[in-house]
Image: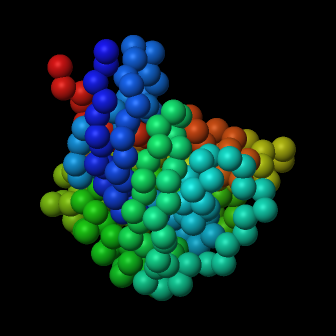
Amino acid sequence: MANILDTLITIVIGTVSGVAQVVNTTVSALQDFFYVKVSGVGFIVLGARQSGKTTLIEWLKNNMHTLDDFNPDPTAAGGDVVPDFTAKVGDQYMKLKPTRDVGGEYAMWETDWMDLFRAAQPRGIIFLIDHNDPVLHKDALNFVMQMIEDEPSTARHLKAFYILVNKSDLWGDAMTLDDILTNFRNEQKRLRGQSERIGYKYEIAEGSLATNRGVSEFMKKFFNTVRPKPQK
């Protein structure tokens, strides 16, 4: 009979605790992450205003179901308190104990974002952009990459920097991911160079948190990158 593992995982917005179900040999990459007994595996979610950070929390709360009618107000300075909730990822149930949902207004970058980065000591960053206002998203992305440069003691923990181009349900019929990324050529070059120098993995993918298009696979890859290697 396979072992049952208790998990304690620190995540973006707080702490996850739960009891894993019976392990089998066909477990997926995402399930495998949650079967590993770890403590202190953290990641943070950043992005300019209204790019989908709060929606990602709601996406987890709704167990990865569609969120067509979800339209939150912008997050206030200092962040919003988020109550505990249970999320289901694959066959696993996780108890999330959040701390706060951090906003994306420019004035919050040097305060809330920096505080979160330093406090979380993250193994991963999920950065959200969309098809609107590319200049704002470029500025926000460059700020995060500069933050990584300026905080080497924190950045040394970083294993993954994943960018989700959100809201593909709105732009997918009129343009492609490559069309959007033409505005981010310099940022992609900088990201590639930084990842090689610091040693993290980066990826850029499209998806829609509102419809769940592409997001589950994106999150599976991200979790598999930030998780510790299973003990042999």
* Color style of the picture: rainbow
Is 119 positioned to the left or the right of 169 in the image? Answer: left
Q: Residue at x 52, y 74 (%)?
A: 104
Whether residue 129 is visible here, answered yes or no, is: no
Quarter of the view holding residue 149: bottom left
Report x, y in % for residue 215. 60, 42
Is 211 positioned to the left or the right of 186 in the image? Answer: right
Point out the image quarter for the C terminus.
top left
Point out the image quarter for the N terminus.
top left
Is 70 positioned to the left or the right of 205 in the image? Answer: right
Quarter of the view holding residue 120: bottom left
Q: Is residue 159 above or below residue 149?
A: above
Quarter of the view holding residue 151: bottom left
Q: Is residue 73 above or below residue 175?
A: below
Foreground pick, 144 / 184: 144
Foreground pick, 177 / 161: 161
Report x, y in % for residue 56. 57, 57
Q: Is residue 193 above or below residue 23?
A: below
Q: Residue at x 38, y 36 (%)?
A: 20
Is 150 positioned to the left or the right of 215 in the image? Answer: left
Foreground pick, 141 / 128: 128
Report x, y in % for residue 160. 36, 44
Whether residue 118 is visible here, answered yes or no, is: yes
Q: Residue at x 33, y 70 (%)?
A: 116
Report x, y in % for residue 147. 31, 66
Q: Residue at x 21, y 60 (%)?
A: 154
Of all residues, the one furthest to the front in this rendering is 1
How many numbered dots are placed on residues in this image? 0
